[in-house]
Image (spheres, rainbow, N blue to C red):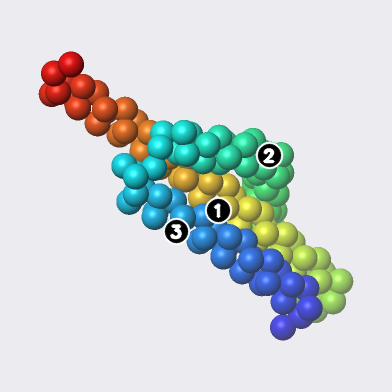
Amino acid sequence: MSERISRLCDELRIKLHGMDRRLEALKSNGVATFDRSQDVLESQLDRVEQRIYDNRVTVEAANVRVKAWLAEKKAGSVTGEALWTERHKAHLLEARADDAEAYAIAVFELAAAAADEATLAVLQALLARNDADVAVLCETEPL
């Protein structure tokens, strides 16, 4: 495996591990919703919203890279992509590998952003459920 691919795999593994930790923490927080205050959930929500906001430029760039790669891939299949393989030109193969690695990174960045969006949605759902539960309690308990 090339050094560049090895680094890519390590970076992806680190990002995936971070996403897994955040999702596990969210899962455990969801189970303990009634033990936690509304402020803690809102604080988590604020952090996730900020992370999404901070990563918006990266996500937009990743979207552009993915769309460009897919368009080039589609155009290449139409124009005879086998040309570079027939000639075995190292620089063309190297450029193809670089493009594929950039595409992989961009897709992973989009996946990480989707995980953040899912985290945001779960936190919003937890807060909405807390509001609904409080409303039900207020209706059933006399003041």
Give the Cα separation between the discs numbered 2 and 1: 16 Å
Q: Give, as a three-letter code, the residue at label 3.
A: Glu
Q: Which residue is mark 3?
A: 24
Quarter occupied by the C terminus = top left
| First-in-chain label (3 vs 1) | 3
Answer with the quarter of the image where residue 102 lies.
bottom right
Q: Is residue 51 left or right of residue 94?
A: left
Residue displayed at 44% across by 58% down: 24
Image quadrant where residue 135 sits: top left
- Is 16 on the left or on the right of 41, as rendered? right
Q: Residue at x 55, y 35 (%)?
A: 46
Q: Residue furthest bottom?
A: 1
- Disc 3, SS: helix
Q: Dots 3 and 2: beta carbons under 8 Å?
A: no
Residue 29 vs residue 1: left or right?
left
CA distance separating discs 3 and 1? 17 Å
Image position, residue 92 (x, y; %):
82, 69
Could you say which disc has been placed on residue 111 in the image? 1
Mark 1 surroundings within 10 Å by alpha-carbon count, few (fewer than 14), some (14 through 19), many (20 or more): some
Residue at the image point whose x is 66% and y is 72% from the top: 9
Report the front residue among 50 and 4.
50
* CB within 8 Å, label 2 to label 1: no
